[in-house]
Amino acid sequence: MIPAPAKRIVLDTNVCLDLFVFNDPRWSALLAAIERGELEAVTRADCRDEYLVVLHYPHLPLADDTRPQAAQRFDQLIKVIAPNSRAIRLPVCTDKDDQKFLELARDAGAEILITKDKALLKLARKTAQAGLFRIMLPEAWIKAQAADTTTML
């Protein structure tokens, strides 16, 4: 049996923090799917740069000796790409710093943008109706995967 190609996804910075800094067990299925190659998580240089800057925020439970591990884990599991910009109009995010995640999902041909950001989540209906990509919470992705597994049995 030929394995299905990996679904391309985009993770926003906060989801990456949950996965690589906080090791949030609620998202272990998401992390495992990326590790197994069922999902191809992609980013672009400016999104990666944002993650690296956030790793230095003082409220995060990281020290100088553990910060490189969080960066290395990101780099192991998320592919940095430089997709060409597609001439497809996107809805405008009220948080201009998050517009880049919409652009990345569009330009990379991602199926899903996984985020906990309210400004991005508000645009989920618009991007889905336009046939672009889905925007969902990590827990919604987990539920959808569980439902897919159940229907396959």
Image (cartoon, rainbow, N blue to C red):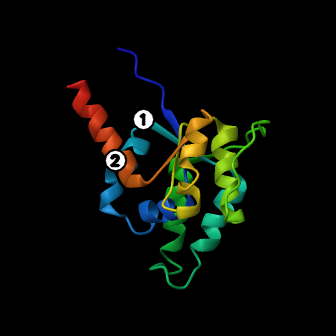
Whole-percent x and y of residue 118? 53, 63
> In screen coordinates, is 111 left or right of 37?
right
In the displayed orientation, state which residue is furthest to the left.
153
Q: Quadrant of residue 90?
A: top right
Q: What SS does tag 1 mark? A: loop
Q: Residues within 10 Å of mark 2 (few under 14, many from 20)?
A: some
- Residue 121 is marked as none
Would you place residue 61 above or below residue 99 in this image?
below
Which three-letter amino acid code belongs to the residue tagged 2? Ile
Q: Residue at x 34, y 41 (%)?
A: 144
Name the image quarter holding residue 12: bottom right
Q: Quadrant of the C terminus?
A: top left
**Mark 2, residue position:** 142
Please state which amino acid type lies under the numbered disc 1: Glu
Kindly identify which residue carries mark 1: 38
Of marks 2 and 1, which one's residue comes earlier in the chain?
A: 1
Q: Quadrant of the N terminus?
A: top left
Circle 2 or circle 1, nearest the eye: 2
Is residue 151 rendered to the left or right of residue 93?
Answer: left
| Residue 64 position in % (x across, y down) | 54, 80
Which residue is at 37% across, 64% downward? 23
What residue do we see at 43% from left, 60% from top? 19
Percent position (x, y) of residue 16?
50, 60
Is residue 4 rendered to the left or right of residue 150?
right
